[in-house]
Image (spheres, helix red, strand yellow):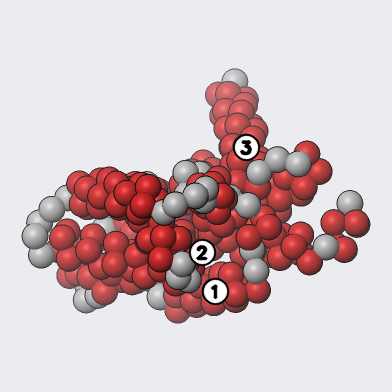
């Protein structure tokens, strides 16, 4: 066990997975309660277009991925607010468009592009200091936002119409929330992969909802699930020589199954 800490890439991978799991776990509560499960999937797949364009032109993949995610978030916001288009409809259209453009960009690049496979399924060897800095900054912003605007976020999550009546800037919160989710997704795809990132944004919130009675309790419980699942997923990935993304996803789903069975058993015992 101790030997894995002798390698820099494993230390980066463990820190990155914990930061990513923590950030996604906090956001997952709002995504689950507001029934916005499609947003993470949409942001990740939309980033695929930007990543593919960066590979084709030989540019900074991280920068293009984040820029694409921000454009995606801004587009979703304005299409939903100004054009009265359903959020999920807008996400579905942009997701397909970006995937189509990404495939076209990759088809134009000559030769084999092995890095795209790493982005699709995650690769712990791709994590570097720059990724850790970005993830740390995003996690700090998320924690500060939850602490400083706790009451406003509760209004925003449970009753958006009532929140507007009490003067909560719902549109600004919604706009910033979309951008934060998109950036966190893009910075996490190196670990979990574009195809599997949705799990980190949904499963912790679903598990926390089974046990918690308040939003704050959900945040604490989901954070623990997210951190532990991500850490163990990376450890299993190393010892079993399997991709980091699937390893984290399977570990997290294993926790969900155990949690579900335990909760079901407790409820059955209470009825007896």
Q: Position of residue 257 (x, y in %)?
A: 60, 32
Horizontal and vertical percent position of residue 106: 40, 51
Q: Residue 115 appears in which quarter of the rendering? A: bottom right
Compared with 57, 241 (above or below) is above
Q: How many marks?
A: 3
Q: Residue at x 29, y 67 (%)?
A: 71
Disc 3 from disc 2: Cα separation: 20 Å
For mark 1, what is the residue?
134
Judge whether residue 23 can be spotted in this image: yes
Element marked by disc 1: helix
Quadrant for the C terminus, please: top right
How far apart are the alpha carbons under marks 1 and 2? 7 Å
Is residue 236 visible from the viewing direction of this image?
A: no
The residue tagged 3 is 250
Secondary-structure class at tag 3: helix
Q: Secondary structure at mark 2?
A: helix
């Amino acid at each position: 066990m101790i030997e894995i800490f002798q390698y820099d890439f494993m230390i980066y991978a463990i820190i990155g997975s914990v930061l990513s799991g923590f950030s996604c776990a906090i956001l997952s509560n709002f995504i689950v309660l507001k029934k916005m499960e499609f947003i993470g999937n949409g942001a990740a797949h939309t980033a695929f277009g930007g990543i593919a364009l960066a590979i084709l032109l030989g540019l900074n993949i991280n920068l293009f991925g984040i820029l694409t995610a921000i454009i995606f978030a801004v587009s979703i916001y304005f299409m939903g607010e100004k054009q009265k288009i359903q959020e999920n409809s807008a996400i579905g259209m942009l997701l397909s468009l970006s995937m189509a453009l990404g495939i076209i960009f990759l088809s134009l690049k000559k030769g084999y592009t092995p890095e795209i496979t790493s982005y699709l399924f995650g690769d712990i060897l791709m994590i570097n200091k720059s990724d850790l800095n970005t993830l740390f900054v995003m996690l700090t912003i998320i924690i500060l936002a939850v602490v400083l605007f706790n009451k406003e976020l509760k209004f925003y999550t449970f009753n958006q119409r009532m929140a507007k009546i009490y003067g909560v800037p719902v549109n600004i919160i919604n706009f910033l929330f979309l951008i934060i989710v998109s950036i966190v997704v893009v910075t996490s795809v190196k670990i979990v992969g574009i195809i599997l990132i949705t799990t980190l944004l949904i499963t912790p919130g679903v598990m926390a909802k089974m046990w918690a009675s308040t939003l704050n309790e959900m945040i604490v419980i989901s954070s623990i699930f997210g951190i532990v699942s991500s850490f163990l997923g990376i450890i299993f990935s190393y010892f079993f020589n399997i991709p980091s993304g699937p390893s984290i996803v399977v570990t997290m789903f294993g926790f969900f199954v155990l949690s579900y069975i335990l909760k079901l058993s407790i409820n059955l015992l209470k009825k007896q």
